[in-house]
Amino acid sequence: MATATALAGQASAGQLAVHALDKSYGDPPQRKRVVAGCSFTLARGELVAMIGPSGCGKSSLVRLLAGFDRPDAGHIELDGQPIDAPGRERLVLFQEAALFPWMTTFDNLLYGPQARGELTAQTRAYADLLLERVGLRAFAHKYPAQLSGGMQRRAELARALINQPKVMLLDEPFRGLDALTRELMWGFFAKLLAESSRTSLLVTTDIDEALYLADRIMIMTNLPTCVRAVIEVDLPRPRTPAELSSPRAIEIKRQALELLTEEASRSFKALRDA
Amino acid sequence: MPVDRQAIRATRRAAISIVLFVALWELGARSHSWLVLPTFAPVREALGMLGFRSERLPWIGAIPAPSNVASAWLTMLHDAAYWRSWGESSLRVLFGFGTALLLGIPVGLVLAMSRTAFGVGFPVLELLRPIPPLAWVPAAIIFWPTQELSIAFVTFLGAFYTIVINVIGGAKAIDPRYLQMAEALGASRWNVFRRIVLPAALPSIVVGAVVGMGITWEVVVAAEMISGGSTQAGEAAGGGLGFLIWSSYVGGSYEQIVIGMISIGIAGLVSSALLRKLGALLTPWERLR
């Protein structure tokens, strides 16, 4: 346990600053503006939830933050350094599990270090430890197809964490899991992310999820997207499912839902008037 | 285990249908011996009216009976020439298919990964691919110095196209997120190729190989028939199972034709099964779906 936190602490969490990001897709005349003048900052070590109506451009934002796409305007800075390409300091957990099917769980974990030529006995020990932390030690030599959905997500988290990224970008990582597994995953991820103290951005459509995990909630506008509002989630930690029914939690939820409904209905209006 | 009962039933059904098939074949082939009996007079009349010969059933009455085939086969098993035919065809298949694999996989991968290579290579491939390999036989005989090389070339073509198309398909269908993840984690291009692209495309490569193997056998047999039938002056006959069938036809030993056909069927079955087994060993993660 001490080793994990010690190893984790070696790479510090990063601060991600986004300034006036602009992004459009497609060729004219179908050119669609997806992100418009979006600005926000993720402070070191905090977990921010990004909630918005479906299809509002959250995934596009994640792609920009991860470096898979370049913005048309504005810039992104990690600890003051501009970023324009993918890198191990900003790792993404996609909506559907992207474990390499032809590698065992253990090999999946070791892939990052191996690819960079950083595979040492210490790394292997860390991998073993991480597997223990996510409860998949017994499945180290199984293939992803032999793991359930929840297990795959946990394995992916471990695969990301071993590279000690400064920022974790989680794009609806619990989508498609049943309600019970989801709640279990929340507990897992909350503990692990807190332990490794990464800066994290969690994209989700589930307010309960945001309430459980996040320090702050960013409500996003409809297309083209930018930050509509920021709500502090000043609920005590560690959070429990019971905490979600406290008066403060309900108040936050009400606020968030109000804003979200407004944004969501705007998209329907646009469809109707189109 | 409940699965066993289903398997038993399926095997029993298969056995019955095969026995029935062989029995009907035997009866039909020997029709000249039972059709003459007085009970079948109306059948003979009907045949006569339809314009067929009435001392045996049409079509099926002319083919060799399975009992004759079986006894001829037993004799052939002692004949060295028969096993030599097996060897000759198998070597040709191995050579042609092996070359197709060795060339087809890299070509397919290069075409899939490089847009320039694809733009240059794919149109030419698609122009040549519709030409059936057997249509190449005369050109191959003219172009290649030996008959063996001409057969090898034609055999190679059959499997080559299939393998390349499947490799391209497999490599292009790789989930882009795998490539994104590898890039983000800092993998070099070579690493991405070796640890992501190649394994991801492997199942498609195996499919291409298995299908290509079947095509190879088809082409070998036909090529042996064609070039074996037209031996060039001074050169020994090509040999092989295809040639066996053709020379049996020319020589009038119809049982041997059937023996040749069944032998090729068995050869194709065994080689495909071996390939599939090998493919499964190379892709252990696919079995677990």
Image (spheres, rainbow, N blue to C red):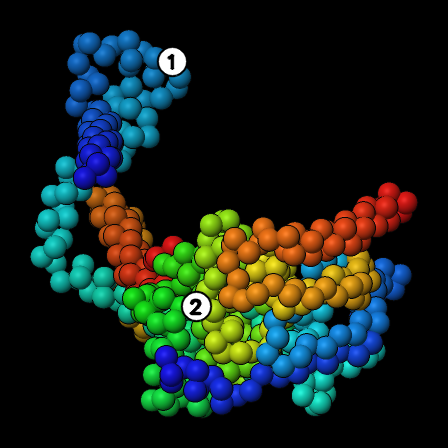
Disc 1 residue type? Answer: Met
Q: Residue B174 or A169: which is nearer the viewer? A: A169
Residue placed under numbered mark 2 in the picture: A155
Q: Residue at x 34, y 17 (%)?
A: B47
Left or right, B236 with respect to A196, comes to left
Numbered disc 2: secondary structure: helix
Residue B179 percent location from the top left of the image: 56, 74
Quarter assignment of residue B211: bottom left
Residue B73 percent location from the top left of the image: 15, 48
Residue A51 percent location from the top left of the image: 69, 60
Q: CA distance from mark 1 to mark 2?
A: 78 Å
Numbered disc 1: secondary structure: helix
Quarter assignment of residue B181: bottom right
Disc 2 residue type? Answer: Ala
Task: Tell me, yes or no, whether the two marked residues, 1 and 2, touch with CB atoms within 8 Å.
Answer: no
Check chain identity for marks 1 and 2: say if they share one. Answer: no
Which dot, 1 or 2, sits closer to the camera?
Answer: 2
